[in-house]
């Protein structure tokens, strides 16, 4: 057979595919929506400080561990972990890390689809608004220019008051995710990752500059970067910061194991993991710097919760020249950012079901997509019909949590770190040293450092935070 592309180019394309797919998975609603929400609810600076520390010392080393398990195994997440264990003469039971992860990711997608549905709502309303502006001969008007700021703030409550619409939007997003996964993630998502993610990044930067100039940037900087360490030791802040580090980098659920399998042999997993971790936290901080200046200038409370992003940015688009266009573009690109993450959430279980039950990819995707949608109804209805239900009042810190908060909190604060803990112990102590070291692409002091982080710092720190999270009384 005659090769149609030179080998060098083919290799370049697959290396880029891995970096882009992994970054596409990492950058999503976790950065735009969840990071500001969590930072706002956990006191700002202390949360951000520990979040950055945990990304550097725990999440980045784990990202490398997950991608190397995937590239070595070239199978579904559970099979890849079991394969490396067997090759290392260790028990295949280590694949438990991927089982916990599979459950976590499936549950995460149940509420992720709900929030992505909110994004779709703003795609729709801002699109209709833009159309109105163009028809009215004012294509560069601010968003919702004919409405008052008070009206813009009522968009979210209005949406929450309409369960049918909420569920319909969630359904649309889950249908898009399911169809892409049914056709195979690799082909479906590359184009979005190559073109839309960079466009999104540039737009976000521009919005941040605007927010910095027109909003209360000083108050935002103080809030985000002045750590109150006493606050950090209150129950919940540490586990929130750790959970956010895992969630934002798509760790613990196996997404990075699955995407590691795309990486070509000559990709340096060590340096690539560093770049992805840096880029992902950078986007989160930039999103925070876009949102908090507006929070303070329009007089919102930082701890407004999950609606924070949706109440601040539309207000900024309202005041911005050309805001109708910018707002619409922002929500469209946010939708694609969510989609490149949600496919990685669904892919894990679909790959496993396909392998385990010899089901076609299409059927497996339909089965899991429908299951996730149905469980997601609990989260979608947490803001109206089921608002009074408290599913896990016996878990410390979750006494007042509705379904949405319970599923979000339990997965990110418990399941993901638990899976990460098992991964760190496995890679640090039980997996074949030579084999693992060779996969990392690291050498010299950096390799020694990584080994120290993964064998000692990750297990001890994650275990400590898990225990503190479960028994908050320990901190007094
Ligand atoms: N990292 C994604 C985000 O920040 O939006 C969410 C996510 C994707 C979490 C994949 C976990 C995962 F496996």
Image: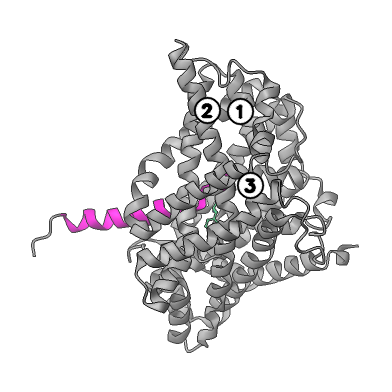
The residue that mark 1 highlights is 314
Disc 3/disc 1 C-alpha distance (Å)? 17 Å
The quarter of the displayed image where residue 292 is located: top right
- Asked whether residue 338 is in view, the answer is yes
Q: What residue occupies the far right of the structure in this picture? A: 476
Is label 2 in a helix, a strand or a loop? Answer: helix
Is label 1 in a helix, a strand or a loop? Answer: helix
The residue that mark 2 highlights is 126
Say which of 144 and 254 sits in front: 144
The stretch of residues the image draws in magenta is: 5-31
Disc 3 Cβ-to-ligand 1 distance below 8 Å: yes
Rendered position, 307 above or below 348: above
Pointer 3 local density, CA inside 10 Å: few below 14, some 14–19, many at least 20 = many
Which one is in front in this view, the residue at disc 2 or the one at disc 1? 2
The quarter of the rendered structure image containing the C terminus is bottom right
Q: Which SS type dominates the magenta stretch?
A: helix
Disc 2/disc 3 C-alpha distance (Å)? 21 Å
Which labelled disc corresponds to residue 69? none
User: Disc 3, disc 1: CB below 8 Å?
Assistant: no
Is label 3 in a helix, a strand or a loop? Answer: helix
User: Disc 2, disc 1: CB below 8 Å?
Assistant: yes
Q: Position of residue 74 (x, y in %)?
A: 37, 72
Say which of 432 and 329 sits in front: 329
Rendered position, 149 above or below 30: above
The quarter of the rendered structure image containing the N terminus is bottom left
The residue that mark 3 highlights is 34
Q: Position of residue 155 (x, y in %)?
A: 64, 31
Q: Is residue 206 magenta?
A: no
Q: Is residue 11 magenta?
A: yes
Residue at (59% x, 62% y) in the render: 107
The picture quadrant for ligand 1 comes to: bottom right
């Amino acid at each position: 057979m005659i090769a149609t592309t030179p080998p060098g180019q083919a290799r370049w394309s697959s290396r880029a595919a891995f970096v882009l797919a992994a970054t596409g998975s990492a950058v999503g609603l976790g950065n735009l929506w969840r990071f500001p929400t969590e930072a706002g609810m956990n006191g700002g600076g202390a949360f951000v400080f520990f979040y950055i520390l945990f990304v550097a010392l725990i999440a980045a080393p784990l990202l490398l561990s997950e991608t190397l398990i995937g590239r070595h195994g070239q199978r579904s997440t559970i099979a890849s972990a079991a394969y490396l264990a067997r090759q290392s003469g260790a028990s295949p039971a280590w694949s438990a890390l991927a089982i916990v992860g599979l459950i976590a990711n499936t549950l995460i997608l149940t509420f992720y689809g709900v929030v992505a549905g909110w994004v779709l709502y703003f795609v729709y309303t801002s699109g209709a608004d833009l159309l109105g502006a163009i028809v009215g001969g004012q294509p560069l008007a601010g968003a919702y220019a004919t409405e008052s700021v008070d009206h813009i703030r009522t968009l979210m409550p209005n949406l929450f008051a309409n369960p049918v619409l909420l569920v319909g939007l969630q359904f649309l997003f889950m249908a898009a995710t399911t169809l892409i996964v049914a056709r195979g993630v690799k082909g479906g998502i590359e184009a979005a990752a190559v073109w839309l993610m960079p466009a999104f990044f540039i737009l976000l930067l521009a919005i941040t500059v605007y927010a910095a100039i027109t909003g209360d940037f000083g108050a935002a900087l103080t809030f985000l970067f002045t750590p109150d360490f006493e606050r950090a030791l209150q129950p919940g802040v540490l586990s929130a910061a750790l959970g956010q580090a895992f969630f934002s980098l798509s760790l613990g659920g196996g997404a990075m194991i699955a995407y590691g399998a795309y990486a070509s042999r000559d990709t340096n997993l060590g340096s690539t993991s560093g770049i992805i971790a840096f880029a992902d936290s950078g986007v989160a901080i930039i999103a925070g710097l876009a949102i908090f200046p507006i929070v303070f200038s329009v007089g919102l409370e930082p701890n407004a919760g999950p609606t924070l992003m949706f109440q601040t940015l539309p207000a900024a688009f309202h005041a911005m020249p050309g805001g109708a266009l910018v707002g619409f573009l922002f929500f469209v690109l946010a939708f694609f950012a969510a989609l490149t993450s949600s496919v990685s959430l669904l892919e894990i279980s679909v790959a496993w079901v396909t392998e385990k039950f010899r089901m076609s990819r299409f059927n497996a995707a339909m089965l899991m997509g429908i299951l996730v949608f149905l469980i997601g109804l609990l989260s979608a209805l947490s803001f109206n019909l089921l608002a009074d239900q408290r599913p896990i009042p016996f878990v410390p810190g979750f006494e007042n949590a509705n379904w949405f908060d319970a599923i979000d909190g339990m997965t990110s604060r418990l399941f993901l770190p638990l899976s990460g803990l098992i991964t760190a112990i496995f890679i640090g102590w039980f997996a074949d040293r030579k084999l693992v070291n060779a996969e990392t692409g690291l050498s010299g002091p950096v390799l020694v450092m990584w080994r120290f982080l993964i064998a000692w710092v990750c297990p001890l720190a994650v275990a400590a935070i898990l225990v503190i999270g479960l028994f908050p009384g320990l901190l007094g």
